[in-house]
Image (cartoon, grey):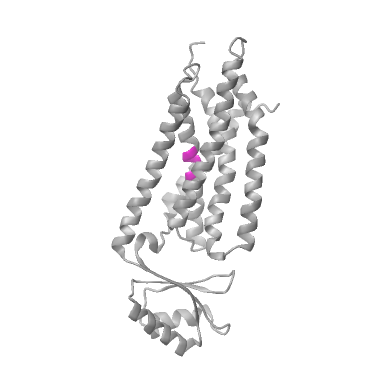
Amino acid sequence: MIPIIKYKFVYLGIAAILVLASVVALITYGLNLGIDFTGGTLWQIQFPETASIESVREVFHTDLESPEAVVIRNDVDGSYNVHLKEINEEMHQDLSQKLDDRLGPIEERSFQSISGVVGGELVKKAGWAVLINLFAIVLYVAYAFRKVSYPVKSWKYSIATLVALFHDALIPLGIFAVLGVFAGVEIDTNFIVATLMVTGFSVHDTIVVFDRIRENLRIRSSRKESFSKIVNDSINETMARSINTSLTLLVVLAAIFVLGVPTLNYFILVILIGTILGTYSSIFVASPLLTLLQSKKK
């Protein structure tokens, strides 16, 4: 039997340090928002092997008179991601022809142009989606544990779940803030979708542990056992299930990350990180928090 509750402040401290580091990263670096949110054009192009990143930048900045263009080389497949101001289809075809003339035949992988107005709307909708998701989870947990009143009231289960979800969502944001500065990684709608998926997985894992706590409280109500012991036993009883489920998912995600489509790598990375964090928070954050929120009547 692992004495998790005995060392709860160690586990909560680790979580707090990671959250604090993520907050510092967000304040220091901010988020590198993609065109989904800022508006503009994202153009993924494959150039001949003879083209260097310097020559590609020179063509865009000078020959094509697009000084605002940001050119980033993808080391995985050798393609280039070019960020431009919003352009229409006529300009798109004109630029394609000029690139063909100057750098040789190009292969267009993708082309996406979004107006600034649409980008602003997506920011609002993404924010509302996250808030509604969190609010719905809090209500669900409070309702699911409405018959539990002692030693921890049902709404405190919601608080513990919310703190765990905050931990699971904020740390990936901090990691991507750092990646945005040092690797040019952007936050797009895929990141939001992945985050919502992660919170769903995390809350499911947390509720499994909470449900075992509720069951043990009912079964062992006649025994003179502390709430901390019941929580610790419940965590240990469900730990193997949580870890095995997560490992199965991680193996699949790792395979997709290595063998899948490169454009989905960061989407998969968010889920990979979130799965690990969700497993950690359900075992070492949410349940230990319940013992801190415990009523002091006994």
Q: Is residue 223 magenta?
A: no
Residue 216: percent from the left, percent from the top? 60, 20
The furthest residue to the right:
1
Residue at (64, 24) in percent of width and height: 233
Give left or right: position of 177 versus 253. left
- Name the residue furthest bottom: 101
Q: Which residue is depicted at the point 35% across and 54% down?
A: 123
Classify the position of the N terminus by image quarter. Answer: top right
Q: Nearer the viewer, residue 208 or 272?
A: 208
Q: Is residue 116 above or below residue 177?
A: below
Q: Taking 90 as reference, is 179 left or right? A: right
Does the rendering let one see residue 152? yes
Q: Main secondary structure of the magenta part?
A: helix
Label count reads 0
Q: In the rendered image of this protein, does residue 202 appear above or below residue 76? A: above
Evaluate whether residue 22 shows in this view: no
What x and y, as percent, mark residue 251?
A: 66, 51
Front-lying residue, 15 or 186? 186
Q: Which residues are magenta?
A: 165-169
Which residue is at a point 48% across and 59% down the rendered structure image?
180
Q: Residue at x 37, y 59 (%)?
A: 37
Measured as percent of width and height from the top left, residue 149 is found at 46, 17
Q: Is residue 201 above or below residue 189?
A: above
Residue 244 position (above or below residue 100): above
Residue 46 on image: x %, y %: 52, 78
Residue 166 falls inside the magenta stretch: yes
